[in-house]
Image (spheres, rainbow, N blue to C red):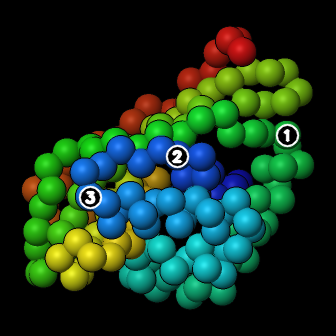
């Protein structure tokens, strides 16, 4: 369950349309989607913030989790209908990093009953080279205090929101 949630929460930038003002960040989001669509998880992890790997035992473990979660999601008949990104708050700087909160909204559909549900979560885009390249942290809807504990390099000025659990609807 945890691996499936990780996959859904972290990697559903598949069909996203990046809505940021930073061309380099938009390019990163696009390349991230392309690798995910191709099932190229080995390259996909290159877009993740490096400190994430220490938390889960390295890149190979992340790749393994992504593959397992992807297979499980397919078996359960869940499909992505749309994803969008938008700025989630003010940019912050700390210790030479530019940090930008991004809101990701995902609409999914269960094929068995055609019920749709949407999720929102925060990504933190981080650049260590003045916006030339970016990596991503998925907050997995954790409280701001927890995120700052996991990643003490993040600015406490970041607007990290916690969203409600997915909402189901009968709409098509």
Identify the residue position indicated by label 3 in the image: 22
Point out the frontmost of discs 2 and 1: 2
**Point 84% across, 30% down: residue:** 111
Residue contact between numbered discs 2 and 1, judged by CB atoms under 8 Å:
no
Does residue 97 sit above or below 102 in this rendering? Answer: below
**Cα distance between the residues tagged 3 and 2:** 15 Å
Relative image position of residue 120 (x, y in whole percent): 46, 38
Does residue 140 sit above or below 66 in this rendering? Answer: above
Numbered disc 1: secondary structure: loop
Q: Earlier in the sequence, mark 3 or mark 2?
A: 2
Q: Earlier in the sequence, mark 2 or mark 1?
A: 2
Q: Which disc, if any, is residue 16?
A: 2
Figure quadrant of the C terminus: top right
Q: Earlier in the sequence, mark 3 or mark 1?
A: 3
Residue 57 is at least partly visible in this image: no
Identify the residue position indicated by label 1 in the image: 77
Point out the frontmost of discs 3 and 2: 3
């Amino acid at each position: 369950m945890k691996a499936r949630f990780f996959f859904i929460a972290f990697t559903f930038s598949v069909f996203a349309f990046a809505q940021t003002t930073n061309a380099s960040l938009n390019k990163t989001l696009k390349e991230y989607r392309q690798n995910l669509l191709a099932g190229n998880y080995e390259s996909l992890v290159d877009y993740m913030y490096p400190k994430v790997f220490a938390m889960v035992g390295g890149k190979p473990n992340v790749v393994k989790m992504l593959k397992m979660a992807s297979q499980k999601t397919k078996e359960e008949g869940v499909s992505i209908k749309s994803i969008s990104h938008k700025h989630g708050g003010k940019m912050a700087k700390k210790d030479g990093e530019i940090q930008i909160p991004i809101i990701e909204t995902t609409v999914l559909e269960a094929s068995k009953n055609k019920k749709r549900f949407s999720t929102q979560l925060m990504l933190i885009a981080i650049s260590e080279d003045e916006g030339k390249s970016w990596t991503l942290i998925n907050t997995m809807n954790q409280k701001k205090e927890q995120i700052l504990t996991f990643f003490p390099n993040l600015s406490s000025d970041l607007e990290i929101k916690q969203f409600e659990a997915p909402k189901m609807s009968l709409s098509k």
